[in-house]
Image (spheres, rainbow, N blue to C red):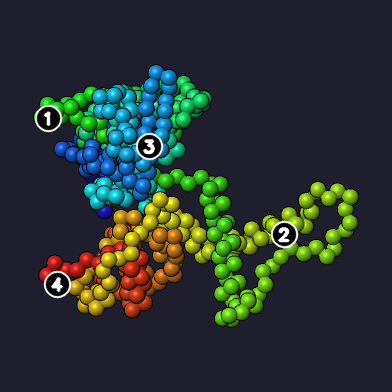
Amino acid sequence: MDVNQSLALLAGLSPAQFMRRHWQKKPLLVRQALPGFQPLLSRAALFKLAASEQAESRLIVQQAKGWRMKQGPFAPRSLPPLSQKAWTLLVQGVDLHDAGAHELLQRFRFVPDARLDDLMISFATAGGGVGPHFDSYDVFLLQASGRRRWKIGRQKDLSLQEGVPLKILQNFEPEQEFVLEAGDMLYLPPRYAHDGIAEAATSGDGKAADCMTYSIGFRSPGRGELAAELLQRLAEFSQDDQQADAPAGRRAAKAPEIYRDPGQDATATPAALPAELAAFASRAVQDALKDPLALACALGEYMTEPKPSVWFDEAADEWDAEAARAGRAGVRLDARTRMMYDADHVFINGESYRAKGADATLMRRLADGRGLVPHELRKASGSAMALLGDWHDAGWLRQEPLADS
């Protein structure tokens, strides 16, 4: 992607300009970000996806007595009738299940993959919404069909209503108001309060238009979350290293360092934590952080770890190594695969690999482009080709033969 090329998607701004002026700073309203846009999934297809165990979905209904929320999956007839007002169906991670949604998400890869999360579809009847709220992450709100009225504001009072199943602001104070039609898009930075209400609308043929909003969301890991994950992974690395030092079939030759206190005096205050134990714990953490490569591995593995609801099907076809070496086939990453890299490693679906030289360049091209064409793939070394074959067998990527091969 040329980050200096102006895009209608960003109201004529280039990705570089958008990131400097708006990203995590201020909203951006884009009229006709995608002119002539049509929903990628029909209402029936979305409802079918919401019935699947593999998709994460929620039903939100606003009633006179208050809000009600239910987790999916939803049987076809368990959803409220379309004639009932003020209900919303949310389906997360649609990009993992629909090729068109995955392709749409690629348009936003001017933001690092480590931050890009998923595409959620919101279907709502007239009056439907999820209440005034704020998100801890950036979001692009693309109106796919129908009409939705958005009220937004830089909310200072973030107190929430009590006794409701949603995080709804208690004292929402909107500052701006927009009505989004199909193809319009609104970008909001983190913690920017917003409330979107579906409105009745008709399509070009005079029929009622479904209100569908696509939310392109981003990951914003918290400091505590990152620290806990990285320390846990660093501890596992240390255990793996100790086991790796052992001869085959024998216990580790190097026993793990444990806390010892031969100089401990008898104590009349047994509940007090020993200062020596605190110092031992501090050294253990500091030692775990000393190796920058280990820390980079832990971070890369965490950021590429698939969500718990994601699993891969083994490849239906065998890996054709001969076709790959002969330049008769390329590869394409599965939509569910998360692949990233740093200066020393390649990370894919929670695993890390040291990479250098021509193979590192090739793997980075695969990660950035989500695929390799045949003439690129044939340049892979024997070990890289074997690794790609393993990823193929695990369902992480697929082989794409040339059309005439």
Q: Amino acid at mark 2?
A: Phe
At a point 43% along the width and 19% down the height, the residue shown is: 65
At a point 56% along the width and 51% down the height, the residue shown is: 227
Q: Amino acid at mark 3?
A: Arg
State whether residue 256 appears in this view: yes
State whether residue 371 appears in this view: no
For disc 4, the marked residue is 405
Q: CA distance from mark 3 to mark 1?
A: 30 Å
Q: CA distance from mark 4 to mark 2?
A: 63 Å
Q: CA distance from mark 3 to mark 4?
A: 45 Å
Q: Residues within 10 Å of mark 1 (few under 14, many from 20)?
A: few
Q: Nearer the viewer, residue 226 or 69?
A: 69
Q: How far across and down, in percent of the image, does residue 90 sit? A: 34, 37
Q: Nearer the viewer, residue 196 or 42?
A: 42
Q: Amino acid at mark 4?
A: Ser
Q: CA distance from mark 2 to mark 3?
A: 47 Å
Closer to the eye: label 3 or 1: 3
Closer to the eye: label 4 or 2: 4
68 shown above or below 350:
above
Q: How far across and down, in percent of the image, does residue 103 sit? A: 25, 50
> Residue 109: which numbered mark, if any?
none
Regarding mark 1 in the picture, which secondary structure is present there?
A: loop
Closer to the eye: label 3 or 4: 3
For disc 3, the marked residue is 58
For disc 1, the marked residue is 204
Q: CA distance from mark 1 to mark 4?
A: 44 Å
131 shown above or below 77:
above
